[in-house]
Image (tube, helix red, strand yellow):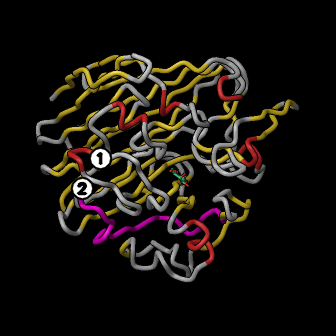
């Protein structure tokens, strides 16, 4: 049905942030901010299912990447180091010894440039060579399209003038019973994966793949998210809950996961052409600010479905490559499909 925009606020250093609202004929709407190419709300069947904030200042006061586009490299790079074509690169550690989500001044903080093309919102950002420690002048575009069948399609495009590494995702925290419901209770989940990447104590992949079989990581059949989250299973204990990368069966565009908020009956299907998905149950969420409408978002009040390349791929030869070769086009897409059970 269309895209409208309004002024959302100003950053602490005076830059304007716009909000674009995509709406379809079913009354479904998705609001996207130019700061961080951030999903600020997703309203489906009159329920806002995405955690978010009412002001730019609140976004600036948290480092939980709420709703943001993550780049240049989603998830962790071990010790903030990698080598490429014989050169060593050093990135800032911002998560224990590791580099997380592109560093503290990653894409989640950039003001992106918006253009509208029919039903598609395109957000562009430029990252100069050396920014955050990464090689290559990189141009990135993220597009958002809300289809009439309530699919939110997110596409990523990027190109660099030098070989570089890349891993882009979106970090929306969903609560399918409403962003203000305070807990992930009554959420059922299915993930189409036989294996996941084992974490070390800092949630960095060790390089080994573990079978989900016989563990609380097995979501091949539906389970509620909270059912086994506190089981005495080392991988869950280390991450204080789910914060792992599931290796999704198959290739190309395919179904990753299905989640249902049993209190609203809202169902989310996640589809993507990425190799894997970090499921993060907001174990470390601790905010100094209140969310939309003055509600608080405690730990485990939202769940992220971060479709992505494997974490730390630049240092793990056995993982699918994160290399973006000079002048080649990086393209990935993810679909978030909403319906009522
Ligand atoms: C996740 C990450 C978590 C946590 C979170 C942001 O993607 O795996 O460990 O850092 O982002 O708070």
> Quick check: 247 left or right of 26?
right
Bounds of the magenta span? 180-198
Identify the residue at the far front of this view.
288
The crowding category of the residue bearing disc 1, from other C-alpha atoms within 10 Å (few below 14, some 14 to 19, many at least 20), is some
Residue 296 appears in which quarter of the rendering? bottom left
Residue at position x 32%, y 48% in the image: 51
Residue for point 40% across, 48% down: 288
Of 258 and 7, nearer the camera is: 7
For disc 2, the marked residue is: 180
Whole-percent x, y for residue 76 in the image:
64, 48
Instruction: Indicate yes or no whether the magenta region holds residue 184.
Output: yes
- The dot on residue 291 is 1
**Rendered view: 116 above or below 230:** above
Disc number for residue 220: none
Q: Residue at x 70, y 35 (%)?
A: 323
The earlier-in-sequence mark between 2 and 1 is 2
Q: Is mark 2 within 8 Å of ligand 1?
A: no
- Rendering coords of residue 336 (x, y %): 34, 47
- Return the residue nearer the eye: 277 or 295: 295
Q: Is residue 137 above or below residue 227?
A: above
Please tell me whether residue 300 belongs to the stretch shown in magenta: no
Q: Are marks 2 and 1 in contact (CB under 8 Å)?
A: yes
Q: Position of residue 57 (x, y in %)?
A: 36, 32
Label 2, secondary structure: give it.
Answer: loop
Q: Quadrant of the C terminus?
A: bottom left
Q: Quadrant of the N terminus?
A: top left
Q: Nearer the viewer, residue 41 or 246?
A: 41
Residue at image location 50% in from the left, 66% down from the top: 242
| Residue 158 placement, left or right of 137 | left
Q: Height in image: 33 above or below 265?
A: above
Left-right relation of 268 to 35: left
């Amino acid at each position: 049905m269309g895209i409208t925009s309004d002024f959302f606020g100003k950053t602490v250093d005076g830059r304007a942030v716009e909000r674009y609202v995509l709406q379809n004929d079913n009354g479904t709407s998705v609001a996207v901010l130019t700061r961080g190419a951030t999903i600020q709300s997703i309203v489906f069947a009159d329920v806002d299912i995405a955690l978010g904030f009412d002001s730019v200042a609140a976004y600036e006061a948290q480092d939980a990447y709420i709703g943001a586009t993550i780049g240049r490299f989603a998830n962790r790079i071990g010790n903030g180091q990698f080598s490429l074509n014989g050169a060593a690169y050093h990135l800032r550690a911002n998560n224990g010894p590791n580099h997380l989500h592109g560093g503290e001044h990653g894409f989640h903080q950039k003001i992106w440039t918006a253009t509208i093309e029919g039903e598609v919102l395109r957000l562009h950002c430029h990252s100069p060579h050396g920014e955050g420690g990464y090689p290559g002048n990189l141009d990135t575009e993220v597009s958002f399209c809300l289809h009439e069948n309530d699919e939110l399609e997110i596409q990523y495009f990027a190109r660099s003038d030098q070989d570089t590494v890349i891993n882009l995702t979106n970090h929306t925290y969903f609560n399918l019973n409403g962003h203000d419901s305070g807990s992930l209770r009554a959420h059922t989940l299915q993930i189409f994966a036989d294996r996941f990447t084992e974490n070390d104590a800092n949630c960095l992949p060790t390089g080994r793949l573990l079978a989900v079989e016989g563990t609380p990581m097995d979501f091949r059949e539906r389970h509620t998210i909270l059912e086994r989250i506190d089981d005495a299973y080392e991988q869950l204990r280390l991450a204080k809950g789910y914060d792992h990368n599931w290796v999704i069966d198959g290739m190309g565009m395919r179904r990753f996961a299905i989640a249902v908020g049993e209190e609203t009956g809202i169902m989310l299907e996640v589809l993507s052409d990425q190799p894997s998905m970090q499921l993060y149950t907001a174990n470390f969420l601790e905010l100094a600010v209140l969310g939309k409408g003055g509600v608080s978002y405690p730990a485990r009040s939202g769940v992220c479905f971060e479709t992505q390349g494997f974490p730390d791929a630049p240092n793990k030869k056995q993982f699918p490559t994160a290399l973006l070769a000079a002048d080649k086009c990086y393209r990935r897409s993810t679909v978030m499909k909403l319906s009522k059970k």
